[in-house]
Image: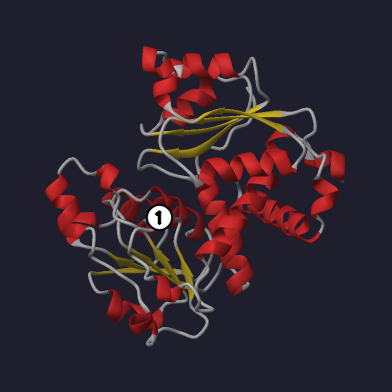
Amino acid sequence: MSRSVIDILDLSTQEIESLIQTAEDIISHGDRYAHACAGKKLATLFFEPSTRTRLSFEAAMYELGGNVLSVTDAATSSASKGESVSDTARTVSCYADIIAMRHPKEGAALVAANNASIPVINAGDGGHCHPTQTLADLLTIRREKGSFSNLTIGLCGDLKFGRTVHSLINAMARYPGNRFVLISPEELKLPSYVKKDVLRENGIPYTQTTSLEKAIPELDVLYMTRVQRERFFNEEDYLRLKDSYILNMAKLKSAKPDLCVMHPLPRVNEISTDVDGDSRACYFKQVLNGKYMRMALIMKLLGMEENLA
C-alpha cells in the first residue's frame, strides 16, 4: 500500500521541517520544479463544496508539470448511485497516481487510503481534520513568527466542528513552550477528547474564554474561524451563534504589533474587511502558502523530490 496522509500526525516533525524547506525552495526557485511531476496525474475527489483547497491542489499539480482529473460534485459521481468510498478509491487508483479527497463523513479518507493502491491525501473529512490546511498554517507561522515554539496561540470561533483547529492543535502541541487560548461560545467549545488526549495528556497549558477582547492582548497568533452553517442540524442555533466573534480594527488596537492573524477561509463576516490592509493580516498569505506546501507534499508522496536532489 502506498503511503497516505490522513492526519497531520502521519507526518513527523522532521518530515514537516523537510516539507517546509522544500516549499521555501519552491518559493525561491519555482522554475526548478516546473516538470517535477511530468506524466503524473492527481485525482481531486471533492464530495463537499470547496474553492481554495481544490484549486490549490490543482494549481499545485499543474505547477509541478502534472495533470489533474477532477470530481467536484458528489451528485455527478457514482457516489450518487450508491458506490462506496472503498470502491471509488480502487477505481480511481486505475486512472491516477495520487488522490486528494474531501468528504463530509469523518473517516472517509482513511477508508479510501486503506483501499487505494496509490497515495491518498485527506483534503478534509467532516469535522475531523484537514492536514494540508495545517501545513499551510505551519508555513505561515514559520514565515511570520520564525519559530513553532514558545507561542501563545488563540483559537477563536467554532472550535467544536472546526477540523482546521483540531489539526493545528495536534501539530503545535508537538513543539515546546506553546500555550493555547480557546475562545468560543459555550456551545462551540473544543471537544473534550481534544483537551484530554492532546492538551492535558501532554501537559500543555490552555485557558478557555468567551471573550476575544480580553484574550487578544496576550496572543502571538490569532486563528479565526467561521461558524459553519453546514455542521448545524438546527438553523436557529446557527443564526444565534454566527455573529459571536467579529474581528475589526477596534479590537486589534490592543493586540501586539507583530500579531499573526490567520483564518483558513472562507470567511463570512468574522474578520472585517478593514483588517485586510493591516500588516498583521496573514490569511491571504496562508492561501498561497497552502499551494507551496501541497506541491511539496505531492512530490514527497510520489517520490519525485528524490529526482530533484
Percent coordinates x, y for residue 271 in the rendering: 37, 68
Report how many numbered discs are placed on residues in the image: 1
Is residue 8 something that shows in the picture?
A: no
In front: 88, or 265? 265
Residue shown at the point (19%, 51%) measured from the top left: 238
Q: Is residue 187 above or below residue 72?
A: below
Toward which corner of the image does residue 152 lie, by quadrant?
bottom left
254 to 237, vertically: above or below? below
What colour scheme does the image use? secondary structure
Viewer can see residue 162: yes
The residue closer to the viewer here, 33 or 185, is 33
Compared to residue 50, the image places residue 157 above or below, namely below
Q: Position of residue 242 (x, y in %)?
A: 23, 58
In-front residue for pair 69/29:
69
- Location of mark 1 (residue): 165
Q: Residue at x 44, y 61 (%)?
A: 263
Horizontal and vertical percent for residue 24? 73, 59
Identify the residue at image location x=59%, y=46%. 56
Residue lying at 51% horizontally and 50% vertically, measured from the top left = 133
Q: Position of residue 7 (x, y in %)?
A: 50, 41
Quarter of the figure with residue 218 = bottom left
SS at badge 1:
helix
Nearer the observer, 285 or 147: 285
> The residue under label 1 is which amino acid type?
Val
User: Which quarter of the rendered picture does the N terminus lie within?
Assistant: top right
Instruction: Classify residue 239 as left or right of residue 93.
Output: left
Question: Neighbour class for label 1 at 10 Å: few (<14), some, many (≥20)?
Answer: many
- Is residue 218 left or right of 237 when viewed as pictured? right
Look at the picture and state if 144 lies above or below 265: below
64 displayed left or right of 150: right
Looking at the image, residue 4 sits to the left or right of residue 163; the answer is: right
